[in-house]
Image (tube, rainbow, N blue to C red):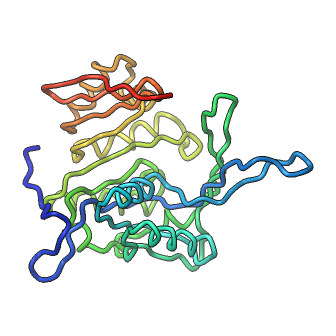
Amino acid sequence: MGKKSCYNGGKQRKGGSTMYDIAGLGEILIDFTPAGVDDCGRTLFARNPGGAVANVLAMNAILGGRCAFMGKVGADSFGDFLRASLVKYGVDCHGLSVSRTVPTTLAFVHLDERGERSFTFYRKPGADILLEEREIRRPLLENCRFFHFGGVSLTDEPLRSTTLSAVTYAREHGALISYDPNYRPPLWEDETQAAFELMSPLSETDILKVSDEEMALLTGVTDLCTGAEILCGSGPVLVLVTLGEQGAFYYTRRWHGLLPAYP
């Protein structure tokens, strides 16, 4: 993709540094998801490890990838659970920091009659947004094939500045940059601010994954080819637009097409 890859098959470089397929930085949190009702008809919630970036790494590790996560949790039972979850799925968590003053971020997931999700966040503040640049393990950024991050990391300081600095550093050391804006309206003041901040990393992004709603937010258009072309013109060489049960649309400067999915 016009950039020299630092990948060497997930093994060790000379000097003993581990090479990672993907290093990710961002939110890791507890997702409380609906789990039926009790005898009185009250909704029950199940505790699950969550966070878009952590999810990507966990799934890639399940598929055999070597992955490392950077983020922050609280010094509480939720933080301990999330660290144990990363270990369980085989994700390197040496980059996971701990806040002694702010608790682990929580999200409650709500489902409508069609199964569509909405979220209530407990993150004002939450530990994930307190990750500072000094806490980043730079060897992870120096020794990865891909660096992945998401737009939830751009809502608040110091996490926003920490994330953008990590993007630049990883890119300078040969990593391909993967970015998911992952727009969550409750975390932003308004759509205008969100669109501005979510567009800001595109010039340093190689692979961009957006939903069709996020594409419309960032470009002002709903046509897939037009919207993807606008996004591609801002920096990415590959734009992926997810369309729910309709599949996913891919766009590069030479090819584009639609891949089907299941409901």
Between 150 and 44, the one lying in front of the other is 44
* Residue at the extreme right: 40
Q: Answer with left or right where residue 169 lies relative to residue 83.
A: left
Instruction: Please tell me which residue is depicted at 57% across the width and 72% down the height of the picture.
Output: 79
Instruction: Give the camera-side residue of 103 and 90.
Output: 90
* Horizontal side, residue 81 vs residue 21: left or right: right
Determine which quarter of the picture holds residue 135: bottom left
On screen, 134 above or below 107?
A: below
Corner quadrant of residue 195: top left
Residue 234 in view: yes
Residue located at (40% from left, 42% from top): 181
* Vertical arrangement, residue 104 with respect to residue 177, above or below: below
Q: Name the quadrant of the N terminus.
A: top left
Residue 215 position, x and y percent, is: 38, 29
* Residue 59 percent across, percent down from the top left: 40, 55
Residue 143 in percent (x, y) is at 19, 68
Residue at (59%, 67%) from the top-left corner? Answer: 104
Q: Quadrant of residue 172?
A: bottom left
Residue at image coords 60%, 71%: 102
Where residue 121 appears, as percent x and y from the top left, is: 63, 52
Question: In the drawing, does residue 149 fall left or right of residue 15?
Answer: right
| Total marks placed | 0
